[in-house]
């Protein structure tokens, strides 16, 4: 019999709240996490808004000593994982069969950026390169596994903006293959100067608000955050009578092999079809789609075209929202936070809105749940995440039923 | 000052990849694309419209794009953010080598980048094998890349991780030798073609070896330190033997992770002795890092490539630069003078990351 994997704990660190309760409340209310960038001077950039996290207090989650030695992405991750584990009511210390699978895009970017600042201002030989130690991407899961004292397999996926889905998918695989019984899976990313500059230079950042699927959408919003879920083998969760949010049914990956930055609807469609095949469901069973919906002209049009290709006219009756309208694009954490949102959608039967929606775009002919949350029974949700390099991912999340 | 590293000074990507389309690529991507090209060529495999969605790609890299990232940012600081070159931006993201390879070779199955430090190459291969074993795909290209960059060189020099950066002797990469005093930083890329065995036999492919087991576990300890008791290494090696269903004495040769650092080599030597017991007297131990230096993510891949070569040729590449015996690292080293020529049917490849991750593979001759 196939080993079933369920979600028993959720953690979020986001620009609209820390902890899944606050996050969900704001998500349903349609609260925007977008504000003026304060982390660095944006006066020489084209745009000045982003989805920075301004309410996260590391002192709530760390001793001062520990937080000094780890980078910001690790702090988000550890705080988020602790929230998820507390939510799951699990003690994982020193367990052999608990592992970590995380995703990130830029990792501890702020550490490297600090080195470069000094390098430019004071000269190459004056730079303090010791911070290099805190910069490798594998520091993030290692810091988490060290602090929680985990002994299972540890992975970090650097698959750009779809990394969260890759990580959750592999966490699910690891449990199914019997290498671990519990996985802490998700993604984390910090607001980085390079990503803000880079996306601005590509001309895909909106000036003040993110309007996915809107005819007049002007682009994405750079964001940050972390989303983590506790994945458990079903029998373990049942035995300890854990609260079960949802079941992970399967996932699909594909690569456009087409262009580094531009999405391709054919690759997206392939990925979603693979996900449904992996989960053993038909497209008729899909009740809700959490879109990648970054708010750029190209992405939303390509995604909508892929959806139409798969679902035909039925796509008008499937709610497809983009919570990036509120959260901005949290890079490697984005699809992980969206996966957390999907779990909450199937658990609560409420679909959060796509905010800032004003004008229908004939190229994005989807029901994007404009501006107001909607009650609807959702059994099966798809979570899309696409990335640079044409990396597509799609996760299938199902309402939990014992049989 | 330390001045040496394992730089590939005669690397000529155009000779391997042709001149077209190399303009926007950084060193890591060129290195990696070259390795994929060579691997596909060696496997006599063509990726075309028919099979492209049945082929996946997983890449291990940790510092791969660091150099591009830093250059992009420094340019933005010096000239102002509006003068940063947008076409270089995708190159700052860790999955750039994988993304470019996907585009160039039309690999559509999946495109994954894994960044688990020294374990990354084996972890990437394991990822590929998991996808093959679960039947989602029949062929995967797994590889790893790590380029030399001034940032990482300066960083490790400041942290006194490099051989010779502490004053003293060097720079020399001499794993397990008493004189060892740090790593010699190096670079490179490596790629493997992993296939479902039945499929490979069917197309009469040349088979270098079979993967008998791949395992990984974590060993929590203090941040940025090797765990002194090597519990994770011991556990990973034991698990790998168990999953491969072989006993310690069935292993002919170990490709160690040892990279010439004082601490790590000693811990690994002790861990090997603990796992292998009496068999440790017989099993040959070598480390390709004595030849290559430390290539982080790619290092496990180089060990594995050498291990496959050892199985094929019946020859264990010697541990070079070994001059002074260290009583804390006593193993049966494959030294140049020894007759290293013998039938080799099972090999263990160790990778242990400084951050606590441990991945081990056992490979064998394909029967």
Image: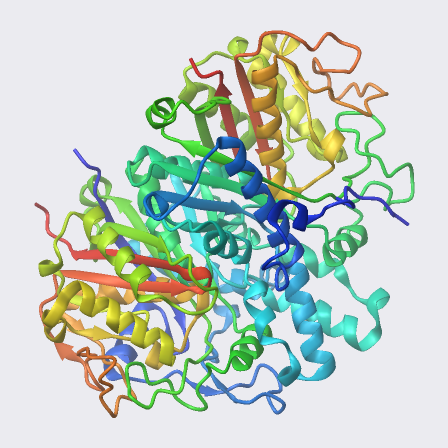
Residue A215 appears in view: yes
Note whether A271 is above or below B250 in the view shown.
below
Quarter of the figure that contains the C terminus of chain B: top left
Query: Closer to the camera, B194 or A131?
Result: B194
Q: Quadrant of residue B174?
A: top right
Q: How is the image coloured?
A: rainbow
Report whether A157 appears left or right of B121.
left
Residue B334 coordinates in the image, percent (x, y): 71, 15
Q: How many marks?
A: 0
Residue A148 visible? no
Estimate the x, y position of residue A352 in percent, counting from the top left: 22, 77
Q: Residue at x 87, y 45 (%)?
A: B166
State whether residue B322 is above or below residue A307. Answer: above
**In the visual, does B103 lie left or right of A180?**
right
Q: Residue B188 location, x and y as percent?
A: 66, 43
User: On screen, A292 above or below B312?
Assistant: below
Residue under the image location 47 percent in, 35 percent down: B193
Image position, residue B359 (x, y; %): 52, 34
Closer to us: B149 or B234: B149
């Amino acid at each position: 019999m196939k080993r079933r994997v369920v979600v028993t704990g959720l953690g979020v660190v986001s620009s609209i709240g820390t902890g899944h309760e606050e996050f969900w409340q704001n998500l349903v209310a349609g609260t925007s996490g977008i504000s003026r960038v304060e982390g660095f001077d944006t006066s020489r950039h084209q745009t000045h808004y982003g989805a920075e996290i301004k309410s996260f207090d590391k002192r709530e989650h760390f001793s001062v000593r520990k937080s000094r030695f780890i980078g910001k992405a690790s702090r988000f991750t550890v705080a988020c994982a602790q929230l998820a584990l507390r939510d799951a009511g699990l003690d994982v210390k020193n367990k052999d069969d608990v592992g970590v699978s995380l995703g990130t895009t830029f990792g501890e970017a702020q550490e490297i950026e600090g080195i470069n600042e000094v390098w430019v201002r004071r000269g190459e030989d004056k730079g303090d390169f010791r911070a290099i130690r805190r910069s490798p991407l594998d520091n993030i899961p290692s810091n988490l596994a060290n602090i929680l004292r985990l002994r299972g397999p540890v992975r970090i996926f650097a698959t750009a903006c779809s990394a969260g889905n890759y990580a959750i998918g592999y966490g699910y695989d690891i449990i199914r293959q019997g290498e671990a019984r519990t996985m802490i899976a998700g993604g984390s990313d910090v607001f980085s100067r390079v990503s803000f500059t880079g996306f601005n230079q590509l001309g895909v950042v909106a000036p003040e608000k993110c309007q996915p699927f809107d005819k007049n959408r002007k682009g994405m919003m750079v964001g940050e955050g972390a989303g983590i879920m506790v994945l458990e083998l079903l029998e373990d969760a049942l035995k300890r009578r854990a609260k079960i949010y949802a079941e992970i049914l399967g996932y699909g990956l594909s690569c456009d092999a087409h262009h580094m930055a531009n999405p391709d609807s054919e690759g997206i469609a392939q990925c979603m079809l693979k996900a449904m095949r992996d989960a053993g469901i038909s497209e008729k069973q899909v009740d809700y789609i959490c879109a990648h919906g970054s708010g750029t002209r190209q992405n939303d049009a390509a995604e909508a075209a892929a959806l139409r290709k798969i679902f035909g006219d039925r796509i008008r009756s499937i709610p497809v929202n983009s919570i990036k309208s509120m959260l901005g694009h949290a890079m490697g954490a984005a699809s992980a936070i969206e996966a957390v949102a999907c779990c909450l959608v199937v658990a609560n039967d409420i679909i959060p809105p796509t905010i800032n929606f004003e004008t229908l775009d004939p190229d994005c002919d989807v029901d994007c749940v404009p501006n107001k949350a909607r009650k609807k029974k959702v059994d099966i949700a798809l979570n899309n995440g696409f990335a640079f390099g044409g990396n597509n991912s799609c996760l299938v999340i199902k309402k939990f039923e014992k049989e | 000052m330390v001045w040496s590293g394992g730089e590939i000074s005669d690397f000529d990507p155009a000779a391997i990849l042709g001149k077209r389309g190399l303009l926007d690529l950084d060193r890591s991507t060129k290195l990696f694309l070259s390795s994929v090209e060579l691997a596909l060529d060696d496997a006599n495999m063509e990726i075309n419209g028919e099979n492209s969605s049945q082929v996946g790609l997983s890449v291990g890299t940790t510092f791969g794009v660091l150099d591009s990232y830093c250059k992009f940012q420094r340019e933005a600081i010096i000239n102002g953010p509006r003068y940063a070159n947008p076409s270089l931006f995708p190159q700052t993201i860790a999955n750039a080598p994988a993304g470019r390879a996907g585009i160039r070779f039309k690999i559509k199955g999946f495109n994954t980048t894994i960044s688990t430090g020294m374990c990354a190459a084996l972890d990437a291969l394991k990822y590929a094998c998991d996808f093959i074993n679960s039947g989602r795909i029949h062929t995967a290209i797994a590889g790893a890349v790590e380029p030399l960059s001034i940032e990482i060189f300066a960083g490790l020099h400041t942290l006194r991780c490099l051989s010779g950066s502490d004053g003293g002797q060097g720079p020399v990469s001499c794993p397990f030798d008493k004189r060892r005093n740090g790593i010699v930083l190096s670079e490179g890329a490596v790629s493997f073609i992993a296939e479902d065995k039945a499929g490979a036999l069917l197309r009469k492919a040349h088979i270098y070896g079979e993967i008998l087991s791949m395992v990984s576990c974590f060993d929590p300890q203090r941040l940025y330190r090797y765990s002194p008791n090597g519990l994770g290494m011991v556990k990973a090696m034991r698990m790998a033997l168990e999953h491969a269903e072989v006993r310690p004495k069935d292993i002919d040769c170990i490709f160690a992770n040892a990279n010439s650092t004082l601490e790590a080599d000693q811990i690994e030597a002790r861990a090997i002795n603990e796992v292998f017991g009496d068999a440790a007297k017989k099993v040959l131990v070598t480390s390709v890092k004595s030849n290559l230096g430390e290539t982080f993510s790619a290092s496990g891949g180089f060990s594995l490539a050498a291990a496959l070569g050892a199985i094929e040729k019946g020859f264990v590449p010697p541990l070079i630069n070994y001059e002074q015996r260290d009583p804390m690292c006593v193993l049966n080293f494959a030294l140049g003078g020894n007759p290293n020529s013998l039938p080799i049917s099972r090999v263990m490849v160790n990778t242990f990351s400084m951050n606590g991750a441990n991945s081990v593979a056992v490979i064998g001759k394909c029967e």
